[in-house]
Image (tube, rainbow, N blue to C red):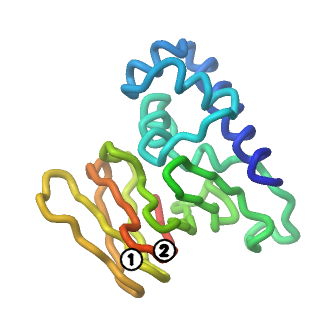
């Protein structure tokens, strides 16, 4: 799949889940503190949500964020994924996530996240119900955790672990690309 097909696939998943939950565009927009127009564009594949937006959408609709990686790609082995077989989400803000796990039905899921120079998860803090951690493969990742005044910057081979519902946001504040392996349960 190309990027536009991936964006359209995400749009369909969001719209179908919202409708399945009997929620209007207005209801969802109000609960995630975004405009109806923005959400309508996301559901039509015309705009990409930020990581913070998709996290808020998933929490509001009662599914883990990994739900949106559920489009199947053909794989030779069910327990192995190769780069061309991975479900990919392209976010606004310069972040691309690829589902590295062969399945999202296990005890944990892995994502490889690419952050372009200056990329950000969004202005708001994420509030994901999953416990999660990360390992910086290359570049630098800056994390702001809940009410901490000072951000923490992690470099290659640094790792972190956050409890469920930790309020945080993240960014690549450098002029070089960053790659992070995320693990969610």
> In the image, what residue occupies the spot 62% across and 52% down?
90
Where does the image place residue 124, in percent across and percent down from the top left?
A: 32, 43
Determine whether 86 is above or below 154 in the image: above
Where does the image place residue 48, in percent across and percent down from the top left?
A: 59, 41
Indicate the secondary structure of the residue bearing disc 2: strand
Q: 92 or 181: nearer the eye?
A: 92
Q: CA separation, marks 2 and 1?
A: 6 Å
> Which residue in the structure is indicated by mark 1?
140
Question: As drawn, which residue projects farthest toward the front?
Answer: 175
* Dot 2 crowding, Cα within 10 Å, few <14, some 14–19, many 20+: many
Question: As drawn, which residue projects farthest toward the bottom?
Answer: 157
Determine whether 130 is above or below 26 in the image: below
> In the image, what residue occupies the spot 62% across and 18% down?
19
Q: Say which quadrant the N terminus sits in.
A: bottom right
Indicate the secondary structure of the residue bearing disc 1: loop
> In the image, what residue occupies the spot 30% across and 47% down?
165
Left or right? Give the position of 70 relative to 48: right
Q: Which mark is residue 11?
A: none
Q: Which mark is residue 178?
A: 2
Q: 102 or 57: nearer the eye?
A: 57
* Dot 1 crowding, Cα within 10 Å, few <14, some 14–19, many 20+: many
> In the image, what residue occupies the spot 79% across and 45% down?
5
**Are the two marked residues, 2 and 1, in contact with CB atoms closer than 8 angstroms?**
yes
Left or right? Give the position of 130 relative to 21: left
Where does the image place residue 157, in percent across and percent down from the top left?
A: 40, 87
Where does the image place residue 74, in percent across and percent down from the top left?
A: 86, 59
Nearest to N terminus: mark 2 or mark 1: 1
Left or right? Give the position of 98 relative to 165: right
Left or right? Give the position of 152 relative to 142: left
Q: How many marks?
A: 2
Q: 121 or 100: nearer the eye?
A: 121
């Amino acid at each position: 799949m190309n990027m536009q097909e991936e964006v359209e696939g995400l749009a369909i998943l969001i719209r179908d889940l919202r409708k399945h939950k009997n929620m209007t565009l207005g209801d969802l927009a109000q609960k995630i503190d975004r405009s109806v127009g923005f959400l309508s564009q996301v559901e039509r594949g015309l705009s990409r949500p930020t990581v913070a937006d998709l996290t808020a959408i998933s929490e509001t609709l009662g599914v883990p964020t990994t739900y949106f990686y559920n489009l199947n790609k053909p794989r030779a082995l069910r327990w192995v994924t190769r780069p061309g077989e991975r479900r990919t989400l392209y976010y606004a803000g310069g972040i691309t996530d690829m589902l590295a796990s062969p399945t999202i039905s296990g005890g944990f899921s892995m994502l490889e996240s690419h952050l372009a120079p200056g990329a950000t998860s969004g202005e708001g803090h994420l509030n994901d119900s999953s416990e999660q951690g990360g390992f910086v493969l290359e570049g630098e990742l800056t994390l702001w955790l809940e009410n901490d005044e000072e951000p923490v910057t992690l470099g290659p081979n640094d790792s972190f672990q956050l409890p469920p519902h930790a309020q945080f946001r993240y960014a690549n504040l450098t002029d070089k690309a960053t790659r992070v392996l995320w693990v969610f349960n």
